[in-house]
Image (cartoon, grey):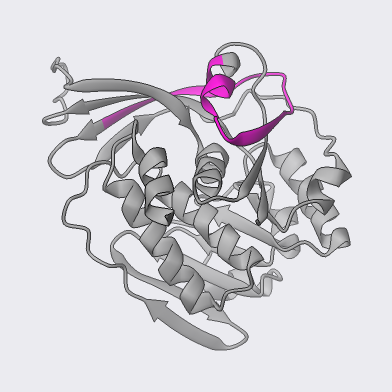
Amino acid sequence: MTTVLCVGLTTLDVTQQVAEFPLPGQKVQSSSVHTAPGGPAANAARAVAALGHRAVLLTALGDEPGGVARGLLAGVEVHDLGPGGPALSVVVVRERDGERTVVSRNAPAFRPLTTVDPALVAGADVVLLDGHLGPAALEAARLARRAGVPVVLDAGSWKPVLDDLLPLVDVAACSASFALPAPEVHARGVPLVIRTDGAAPVTWSQGGTTGAEPVPPVPDVRDTNGAGDVWHGALAVAVARGLPVAEAVRWANAVAAVRVRHAAWDWVEELVRWRG
């Protein structure tokens, strides 16, 4: 069993499915509503646990609605940095294609503790960071470097902490909108840079070698929210297992496909079934 330490953001997501997104000033009725933990680190941890591995989540929960989020993180070993608590995110998902829109404040007002237990890092096979809760992420990366534990970065958007964090990262998995191109990420000390771009092929570069892996089409998409987070959780497991990059990307693509084929309330259970 692989142990993945996920460090970063937890939100409490209220997800509603609608036939069409509302126009400005319009009110629409949803066909369903569901409350679940969200956020890059929490979603990745839930995916790791569903895939049959040990998921350790270092996050800021604090008080309400943190207690609600904690109660819904079944199968995940949670370590709370508090104070603060998870941001409340409102997610609206369009039924016909799973497209979503999200309104959230992320963690701008959080003042979490920055002390990271070295035992958490030393006991992990890989550390996955989303760049939120920056001081804690940086401390976890420094501890991982000293302990020889690989660090994977979910680089969805630029955050100020990345100036100091990137030199400590082994794998940077960047979104298409991430500010820095791959050569510049490499120049900051990252050996392997992967870039995702929705349904477009996933590309990577390492040691002067480049590659691409197509994303298999998913005709029955139900909900795309958090699919990238789930992909990063799967990638972290693959990195810990030492899989070659092409194989790691293919596996992460397959795991993310399970996520988008299911809704917010059943994707974890379906991922458990999928893994067999």
Residue 263 coordinates in the image, percent (x, y): 29, 37
Residue 267 coordinates in the image, percent (x, y): 36, 40
Q: Which residue lies furthest to the bottom in this view?
A: 208
Q: How many marks?
A: 0
Q: Can residue 204 be seen in this view?
A: no
Give the left or right position of residue 118, taking residue 42 as reference. right
Give the left or right position of residue 61, taking residue 49 as reference. right
For the point 80% across and 51% down, the residue is 123
Residue 79 coordinates in the image, percent (x, y): 72, 31
Q: What span is in magenta?
A: 68-92
Quarter-of-image position of residue 217: bottom left
The vertical placement of 7 against 219, above or below, is above
Give the left or right position of residue 166, taking residue 244 as reference. right
- Using the image as rendered, state which of residue 143 and residue 266 is in the foreground: 266
For the point 68% across and 67% down, the residue is 170
Task: Decide whether residue 85 is among the magenta residues.
Answer: yes
Q: Residue furthest front?
A: 276
The vertical placement of 183 against 40, above or below, is below
Quarter-of-image position of residue 111: top right
The vertical placement of 163 against 22, above or below, is below
Q: In which quarter of the image is the N terminus?
A: bottom right
The vertical placement of 183 against 48, above or below, is below
Q: In which quarter of the image is the C terminus?
A: bottom left
Residue 252 coordinates in the image, percent (x, y): 45, 62
For the point 81% across and 46% down, the residue is 139
Q: Is residue 224 visible?
A: yes
Q: Which residue lies furthest to the top in this view?
A: 64
